[in-house]
Image (cartoon, rainbow, N blue to C red):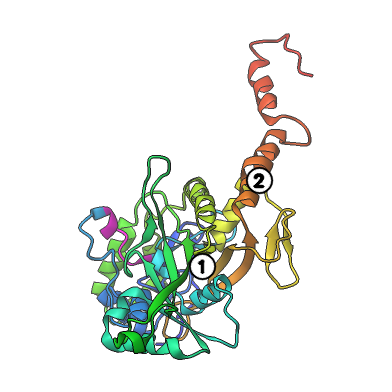
Amino acid sequence: MTHPIHDVSASYANASRPHVSEWFGHRVFPIVSGSSEALFDQVNHRCPFLTKALGTSQRCVKSDETRADRRNSAGVCTISSVSNGPRQDWLVCPFRALDDDLLEEMVRRLFSVDNACTVLIQAAPVLENPETRDRTLASLSDPHVRTFVYFQGKLGGEIGLPKTFASPAVSFDVTVVEIIQSETQSLIETGIPGENIALGKYGVIELQTTDTHGSYKETVNGLTNALSLHPNEFHAQLANNPQWAGNKVEGPNVSNVFKRTFYQVTFKFQATKRPSSVGCILVLPKPVWDSWQPFLGAPTVTQMDDGTYRLLDDETTDPRDWIYVFDVGAHPSVGGPAPLAVDMVLGTNAATLSKAALDIAPRKAVEGQGANDAVKAVLLKRLRTNLPGLDRS
């Protein structure tokens, strides 16, 4: 079967509960992907995103973990929750955002690559393959190709800044660096292929995943057992029993999502302001961006002539830092995971984000309704019984 079985949410009594929405890369709620590729990945605990990035079959990194809390989340990519009101997919695994089209779009923007130019983007570990390495090096002589290598947690390891006595250690989720021909030595001079190359500028991409309350243990065990019991009818059975994907699943920790991200991203926006860097992109799933609005004071967003957006009164025409807001497609592609779609590209900087979060949002919180101080209003309410003579004006 290569198409979804059906949408189970309309007739499902507990559809408002959080559910695991993607398991080993494929939809299990509210659409059940019934493709043979989905079944293969789920049976073999294969991650389709790492597999595509590395060109060889890769198991889900959580499947082989020794820690119980990691094993309990094996295969869980996204959580479907109504925490913001509408049902949305919250990413809980960073590798779910490994998408060739999205990565290329971000690299083109960071490095100002013309649309007429081809980009070659490789995960660092694939350069261990001699054929891939030779093909990558050969691309450097083509003036119509620009070549990049990136590092991520399981793809060569994270790159970052070490701790000093006056600054914390920070790691970048994804670091992309351009590979260029050396200006100081040539192949003729060295006689060694690959010895006439140099590193160009680098860019940083930060991805915000979501912490959730509770554990996925019951759901992961239930899906695993159902797959063992119904190897040939798993997807049909799952469509008829959508509660399997929502057994004791809890929603996202919305407050923690912002608190653990804001400092890091503003720090990294500033830390990449240097001649050797092209800047930083923060990649936010749409539900995360929606959940950020109260923390940013629900800032005004203005569309620019080029289709990108700016916050507040920022009218910068050439920002170095960006926020990409994307969403997971509601329907799986034919035989594969649901595609990612960019919802908004917002140019910004640390100062503008700080103004929204540390100036506008607190002011609106204190003002409450109109010009009243909401804190003082609560104090008056709490004390009026014990202090009957309290001036309420």
Q: Write the residue at 33% across / 70% down.
A: 155
Tell which of 45 and 114 is nearer to you: 114
Image-based side of 101 in relation to 63, left or right:
right
Expressed as whole percent of the image width and height from the top left, the position of residue 79 reads 44, 61
Type of the residue with mark 2: Lys
Vertical side of 3 occupied by 198: above or below? above
299 versus 393 height, above or below? below
> Could you say which is closer to the camera, residue 119 or residue 235?
119
In this view of the protein, can residue 362 be seen by the observer? yes
Q: Which residue does the numbered mark 1 point to in the structure image?
A: 9
Going by the image, does 384 lie left or right of 174?
right
Q: Residues within 10 Å of mark 2 (few under 14, many from 20)?
A: some
Figure quadrant of residue 287: bottom right
Q: Image point 58% across, 57% down: which residue? A: 289
Q: Which residue is mark 2?
A: 355
Give the percent coordinates (x, y) of residue 166: 42, 40
Q: Which residues are magenta?
A: 69-76
Amino acid at circle 1:
Ser
Q: Earlier in the sequence, mark 2 or mark 1?
A: 1
Q: Residue lying furthest left in this view?
A: 66
Could you say where residue 326 lies in the image, as x and y percent from the top left?
56, 68
